[in-house]
Image (cartoon, rainbow, N blue to C red):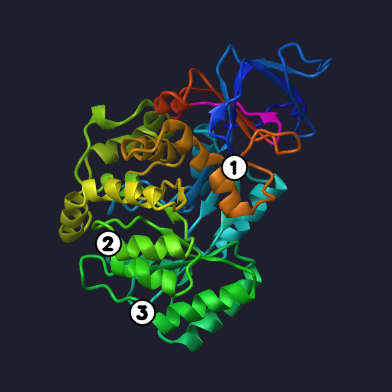
Amino acid sequence: MSRPRDPTNDLVIRNVRVFDAPAAALLAGPRDVVVRDGRIAAIGAPGIDAAGVPAIDGQGGTLLPGLVDAHTHTGGSSEPPGVGTLPDVADNLAAFLYAGVTTALDLGGLSPAMFRERERVASGERLGPRLYVAGPIFTAPGGHPAEVLREGLPWYLRWYVVPRATREVGTPDEARDAVTALLRERPDMLKVAIDAGAGAVPCLAPETLAAITAAGHAAGIRTIVHIGSSAEAIAAVRGGADALAHAPWREALSDEAVRTIAAGHVPVVATLTVWDLLEGPRTAADFAPLEREVATPKLMTHLLAPPANGVDPAVVRLVTAAHAARRQNVAKLRAAGVTVLAGSDACNPGDLPGAGLHLELARLVEAGMPPAEALRAATSTNARFIGGDAADFGEIAVGKRADLVVVTGDPTARIGDVDRITHVIVGGALLARRPRG
């Protein structure tokens, strides 16, 4: 991905069907959309006056708001465990843009590195989606993901990564002190993990979790909690969680858990894809064209021949057994009126930046969500969760930031059409898209 040599933030996109994200529907008939100074200036009938402004012919395709991924790890790696390749953040960010993801919520990365990345993107020094960053993941001593990092990283990386990617806190006082220290970096959200995994991973005590969320709330910062079971979902909501990451991943939601989540008005990032990808090796035919386009040939080789020292077999068994339950959990949450957010959990092993959100949309539709609702989740719903009611992205409306994607076909009828991207526009600038695969 690259910016144009002669950048302009003014353009007109002609002859497109416009997706009204809040309504989860296409506006009637073709439209022209005018962008000036990086923001949407007008939406009108074909032939709208935009003299002197560069034009894009949408050729009857669909204009979407730039996609918003509500669960990423942009400083991570999609390589299989054990490969040992260092993450390439710039490549990850370019891949998100290639796939039309123009805003990403990073829910766990090295601190302060990911906060510096957020600043580089905001200043224009780095080309990437607008980043919202949580920083390190709060967890119990030896809790998730600290235990995975210690087991999976070579010694020469372990000592560096673990204390920067996590905050292991054992008491409420330690938790409050850790939050206070992190506030200097201005986190957009706090990330906490309470996930016993296959059964032996330590979890935060309820009072320690409550201390983290309360300290965040006192500073005006919300907390999203990674959970894996119904009991953990209930504990997270009772502990003050503002959202849940995973729906959960290893079992069917209990009726009590659904009631608790719904009563607390707590949204859930479903993340079906990242768990499906753990179920077993993939063949070449299993990869979508968009995945191949964002992956390097070297990465594809590694993904098709993963090393033997991979994920804990006990976790794989749990994930595989709960395949249908994860989809049923999405249906239960929707039926209870819970807001379901769209997040890929990229960049985890096999979960490719940008392309992972497209896989997630397809899986949400598999779980019973209509395509237009899935697209709303990945645009305006995610935007309002991340940026509040005044979010200036995630919607095609006058005054909103011109982060836009043109696709061929109608993804409100066929969710797979969201993969058929012809143009990506960020802040009114048309980017040059080049596949890597």
Res 236 → quadrant: bottom left
Mark 1 surroundings within 10 Å by alpha-carbon count, few (fewer than 14), some (14 through 19), many (20 or more): many
Give, as a three-letter code, the residue at label 1: Gly
The residue at which mark 3 appears reads as: 141
Mark 3 surroundings within 10 Å by alpha-carbon count, few (fewer than 14), some (14 through 19), many (20 or more): some
- Tell which circle, 2 or 1, labels the residue nearer the N-terminal end: 1
Observer-side mark, 3 or 2, equals: 2
- Which residues, given as a range, are shown in magenta? 427-434
Quadrant for the C terminus, please. Answer: top left
Q: Is residue 316 visible?
A: yes
Observer-side mark, 2 or 1, equals: 2
Q: Nearer the viewer, residue 312 or 225?
A: 225
Disc 1 secondary structure class = loop
The residue at which mark 2 appears reads as: 254
Position above or below: 271 against 206: above
Quadrant for the N terminus, please. Answer: top right
View extreme (right): residue: 51
The residue at which mark 1 appears reads as: 128
- Tell which circle, 3 or 1, labels the residue nearer the N-terminal end: 1
Position above or below: 278 against 116: above
Res 304 → quadrant: top left
* Residue 338: image location, x then y, percent: 44, 53
Res 183 → quadrant: bottom right
Q: Nearer the viewer, residue 296 or 431?
A: 431
* Residue 252: image location, x then y, percent: 24, 56
* Residue 420: image location, x then y, percent: 46, 22
Specify whether 280 is left or right of 158. left
Identify the main secondary structure in magenta: loop
Specify whether 397 is left or right of 271. right
* Residue 109: image location, x then y, percent: 48, 60
Disc 2 secondary structure class = loop
Residue drawn at x 16%, y 57% is: 313
